[in-house]
Image (cartoon, helix red, strand yellow):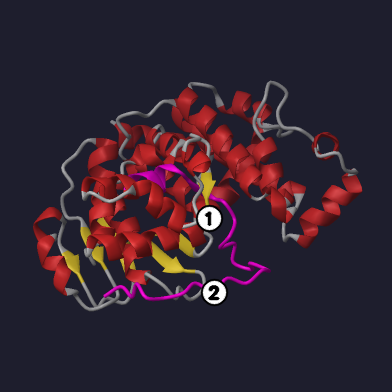
Amino acid sequence: MANTNVELVISSKDPHGLNRPSLPVAYPLLLLEMLSERGHSTEQVASDSGIAAHVLAKPEGRISLTQWTRLALHAIRLSGEQGLGIEYGLRLKPSAHGFLGYAAMTAPTLRQAITLATQYFRMRLQSYHLHLAEDGERAVLEISQAHPIPVLRSFFFECLLVSMKQLPASFIGEKAEEVELWFDWPEPAYFARYRDRLPPTRFSQPANQLRFPRRYLERQPMLADDSAHGQAIAQVAREYASVRSEDENLVPKVRAALMLGDTSYPSLDELAERLHISSRTLRRKLDLQGASYQALLDEARQRDARQLLESSALDIQTISSRLGFLNPPSFTRAFRKWTGESPSQYRLRCLNVKN
């Protein structure tokens, strides 16, 4: 059961990013709407949670995890509903995630949609990790905590996993069959009220997971659109760089700038000029942050190679040239290193899956 009588103690140094405005206002607005339906003054609840009205009024507004936690504490106390996390998860739509949700919905496959979500998940919630794995014929989407969560642990896991249980149905338009939810705590009394609205749910499990048939991963989302997907990814990358800018983390900024253009990718010197620093400083800062220009370039090349092989009719030589490789054999060697397949094998497999 959630403990709503907890004072949040926040370090001024904020090592875990608890005070960083990273959560879109769509998240608190939904919870406030649920409270309004129960007859509570949302303005007062928001104010008591430290959320300014002008922030909620802006589509691009953001709140911190600290504010979100305070709001959830108030919401559970006022509603008297310990299972509010489940109710919230059932009502949270993919569109609430903004450009990240749109990028996922327009991805070529459900696998790529989930991969994108795992890549940028900590942009929103630094306290959690999202990981996709495959266990035989099952796909496993697991959420774990990056560090101990002192307040409302079950509420947040329920919010996240229950909302994700809609992935197969809402993305690929198929009835969600053989989907399971796993939670690592004993079954709470309030779960009985939600049992009929959820897929089979197991408690006291070793991890917090959404489990579903692996075959869903290669299905094409109903809204798949190569052009829209590329635009949404670019916007998500810019959003990520913006959210992290206060930490002087150059990795997301470089990642956001490494977008495939008419003349391949920007060079290290061009990126440094955009960031108003020297090439030497950029190289040094990336190294301190555990990255390098070449590694990030390879990441961008791999991303765009997969997309071009899956969604375009360009031949291998043209794709190789667009990605900046000296010749097709160099591209093939790099692609095999990334995926274990040649570009031709990868394209053929993708075509077979679609057919």
Q: Which residue is mark 2?
A: 9
The amino acid on which the numbered mark 1 sits, given as a three-letter code, is Ser
Vertical placement of residue 10 versus 295, above or below: below
Total tally of numbered discs in the picture: 2
What label sits on residue 64 in the rendered view? 1
Quarter of the picture containing the N terminus is bottom left
Q: Secondary structure at mark 1?
A: loop
Position in image of residue 346 (x %, y %): 46, 39
Q: Secondary structure at mark 2?
A: loop
Answer with the quarter of the image where residue 253 lies: top right
Position in image of residue 299 (x %, y %): 62, 46
Q: Is 213 within the magenta?
A: no
Answer with the quarter of the image where residue 315 lies: top right
Q: Earlier in the sequence, mark 1 or mark 2?
A: 2
Range drawn in magenta: 1-30
Is 126 or 288 nearer to us in this picture?
126
Position in image of residue 239 (x %, y %): 59, 40
Quarter of the picture containing the C terminus is top left
- At a point 41% along the width and 76% down the height, the residue shown is 6
Most prominent secondary structure in the magenta stretch?
loop
Q: Is 16 within the magenta?
A: yes
Within-10-Å neighbours for mark 1: few <14, some 14–19, many 20+: many
- At a point 11% along the width and 62% down the height, the residue shown is 193
261 relative position to 172: left or right: right
- At a point 21% along the width and 60% down the height, the residue shown is 180
